[in-house]
Image (spheres, grey):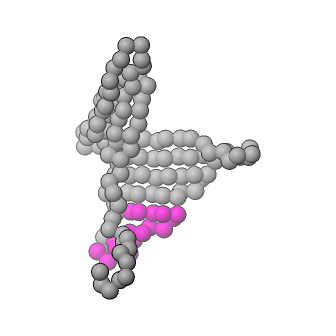
C-alpha cells in the first residue's frame, strides 16, 4: 500500500497481556483472588535466576505483574495422579528486570511502554495532552 513494494509491519499497539500459571495445590487463598476484588487488581512478583554456561555469576530475574485472575482450569482429575490448577491472569501491568536492569515496563492504564528505559508512548502522551 502507499507505493510500497512489500508489506511491512507497523506499530498498531500491543496484544493483550496474559500469563498462565500452574499450581500444584488448591489453595483457598488463591480462589479468593479470582476476579476484580473490591476494584483492585492482584499484584504478583515472580523471581528466578539466570546463570550462563561455565559461569559462577547468577543474575536475578524479576517479573512484576498486576491484573486479575480471569480463569481457573481444574484439568482432568485422575486416580493416583496429582491434581493441578492452571490459572490465567489478565495483566494490565508488566515489568521485567534482569540483573537490576529494568528492560521492559508496560503500564496499560497509564499509557506507558518503556523498553530499555525509553517510554515509547511519551511523545503520543504529549501530543494528546496527557
Q: Quadrant location of residue 86?
A: top left
Q: Residue drawn 35% across and 51% down? A: 17
> Residue placed at 37% from the left, 70% from the top?
9
Front one among 79 and 85:
79
Q: Residue at x 34, y 71 (%)?
A: 125
Q: Position of residue 57 (x, y in %)?
A: 71, 46
Compare residues 48 and 29 and report the one nearer the observer: 48
Q: Magenta stretch?
A: 112-128
The residue positioned 36% from the left and 17% from the top of the image is 78
Q: Is residue 104 magenta?
A: no
* Location of residue 115 with respect to 4 vertically, above or below: above
Q: Residue furthest bottom?
A: 3
- Residue furthest top in the image: 80
Placement of the N terminus among the 4 image quadrants: bottom left
The answer to whether 103 is drawn above or below residue 67 in the figure is below
Based on the displayed image, in which of its 4 quarters is residue 130 positioned?
bottom left
Residue 25: x and y in percent read 41, 23
In the rendered view, tell whether residue 49 sits above or below residue 75: below
Horizontally, residue 13 falls left or right of residue 119, namely left
- Residue 120 among those drawn in magenta: yes
The front one of 91 and 129 is 91
Total marks placed? 0
Residue 56, image x and y in percent? 74, 44
Pinpoint residue 18: horizontal percent, then vertical percent.
35, 47
In this picture, is 57 found above or below 127? above
Amino acid at each position: 500500500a502507499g507505493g510500497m513494494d512489500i508489506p511491512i509491519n507497523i506499530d498498531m499497539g500491543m496484544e493483550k497481556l496474559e500469563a498462565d500459571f500452574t499450581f500444584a495445590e488448591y489453595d483457598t487463598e488463591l480462589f479468593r483472588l479470582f476476579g476484580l476484588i473490591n476494584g483492585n487488581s492482584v499484584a504478583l512478583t515472580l523471581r528466578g535466576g539466570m546463570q550462563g554456561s561455565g559461569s559462577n555469576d547468577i543474575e536475578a530475574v524479576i517479573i512484576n505483574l498486576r491484573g486479575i485472575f480471569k480463569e481457573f482450569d481444574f484439568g482432568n482429575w485422575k486416580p493416583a495422579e496429582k491434581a493441578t490448577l492452571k490459572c490465567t491472569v489478565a495483566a494490565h501491568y508488566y515489568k521485567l528486570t534482569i540483573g537490576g536492569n529494568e528492560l521492559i515496563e508496560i503500564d496499560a492504564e497509564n499509557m506507558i511502554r518503556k523498553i530499555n528505559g525509553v517510554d515509547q508512548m511519551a511523545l503520543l502522551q504529549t501530543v494528546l495532552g496527557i
